[in-house]
Amino acid sequence: METSLENISAAVKKVLMELVEERTSQGSGPSGIFETIDEAVENAVVAQKRLKQLPLELRKEIIAAIRKAALDGNERLSALAVQETGLGRYEDKVRENILCASKSTGPEDIEPRAYSGDHGLTLVEYAPRGVIGSLTPITNPTGTVIHNAICMISGGNAVVFNCHPSARETSVQTIKVIHRAIVEAGGPPGLIGAVAKPTLDTARELMEHPKVNMLVATGGKPVVNAVLRSGKKAIGAGAGNPPVVVDETANIRRAAACIINGASINNNIFCTSEKEVIVVDAVADALIKFMQETGKAYLLTPEEAGQITEVVVTPEGKINTRFIGKNVQVILKEIGLSIAEEYRIAILEAPKTHPLVWLEQMMPVLPIVRVENVSEAIRLGVEVEQGNRHTAVMHSNHIDHMTTFAREVETTIFVKNGPSYAGIGLGGEGHTAFTIAGPTGEGLTSARTFTRVRRCTLVDAFRII
Ligand code: NAD
């Protein structure tokens, strides 16, 4: 995704660039930031070997230190992410980082398992992969790094990041915060690393490096396909287009509030956020009315909806990347509309063929499609998800309806009667992940995802009962 830095004042940009240059010129490495991929990987190899020799108790302390450092640096890193990328909302970045720092899984996720029986004892342990190469998206430059670092290091690995070039300052700063926390907690330097200036060439070098044992891509289809073609063990966390279906049995007021909150968080750049609403006609008017009553949703007239569509969708039928992650006020200004600061999202009624129903817009403009009945809603929900197997949401009080949609859409995350973000642990049970591996099937990644499963069998002994 192309992103401009147009929203950043020249002065802020200059200071940020100087910060990075200063750190880079201090010499390659001491902060986890290296000049070349090869240096980062070689240091990671050494660091990972040392981590393996350290007590597990120390690994737990390192993870606790990473969590704390990410929380301590949260406000600065969140502000930097919004300034540098021009995407999302500061307060939502703060929530994202709290979620990643506190609910990404730690070493508890790699507790060994044992089988005991007549033939003795078999032990199953989760062993490190080694050095992991991780490619991260512009949409979550802090959250993905924090989540990946916690899970990958908990699994006993080192990680080298190739971050999105348009989020490099934020990524560098996040990695430095984590690197410092690791070293201060007694961990080896270089356990987390990156190059100061990531590019597509450094991404290729990382993917091809013989000492990188595993690759993880969090982003769109091209990068997921690139790691899958690498010949290495690869985890792909790709794009989605999450539908939300509302049937006539739902609590409509609650559904309206959940959808507006889920679709507007971080200006819709979460890959899990509701991207189109499909509602049964009998309750559509009520849903739209309750959405407006939240005070956060601006209903576009049919004429305004047409004009906005021309602004955010290019003549070639693609999303206009200029508006990704922008506040709704910025987007509506393009057609001369000025709306109050309280608004978080624009909603519009749309036919099922409308481009925003099929494209991953990643901006706070949400199409609503009316259908005759729940069967049609579920059918359309499955179609617009387009086999991404990412996320889907349903509001209903009918068990069969929810079961049918969940079975047919086959998404990694299925949320019932809540905002989409409940599915990543924000106001919902379970751990969080900002690398949601739908294409390769690992689901919400955890420490165990980044391990090899090893078994040791002791024959006819060691059973104590
Ligand atoms: P992107 O695919 O443009 O970039 C992701 C990363 O891959 C970046 O570091 C980029 O430099 C790199 N990259 C891109 N193409 C590459 C190629 N051909 N070879 C090597 N590296 C390449 O994605 P983005 O715009 O940064 O992020 C938004 C996308 O990511 C959305 O589609 C969103 O749904 C998805 N996403 C998915 C998840 C998930 O967990 N499934 C999480 C966050 C974002």
Image: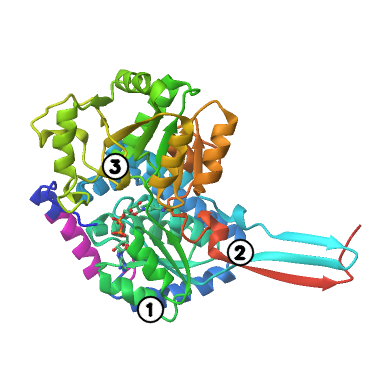
Which secondary structure lies at badge 1? helix
Depth check, mark 1 against mark 3: the one in front is 3
Amino acid bearing label 3: Thr
Depth check, mark 3 against mark 2: the one in front is 3
Depth check, mark 2 against mark 1: the one in front is 1
Q: On the image, numbered disc 1 is attached to which residue?
A: 208
Q: CA gap, disc 2 to disc 1?
A: 32 Å
Which secondary structure lies at badge 2? loop
| Magenta span contains residue 21 | yes
Q: In this picture, is 119 found above or below 242?
A: below
Q: Quick one: 130 or 257, which is closer to the camera? A: 257
Q: Are marks 2 and 1 in contact (CB under 8 Å)?
A: no
Q: Tag on residue 55?
A: 2
Magenta part of the chain: 14-33
Nearer-N-terminus badge (3/2): 2
Residue 117: % across, % down: 87, 62
Q: On the image, numbered disc 3 is attached to which residue?
A: 353
Q: In this picture, is 286 found above or below 221?
A: above
Residue 118: % across, % down: 91, 64
Q: Quick one: 89 or 18, which is closer to the camera? A: 89
Instruction: Name the main secondary structure of what is drawn in magenta.
Output: helix
Which secondary structure lies at badge 3? loop
**Is residue 128 in sight in this rendering?**
yes
Q: Tag on residue 288?
A: none
Q: CA gap, disc 3 to disc 2?
A: 58 Å
Residue 369: % across, % down: 33, 33
Amino acid bearing label 2: Pro
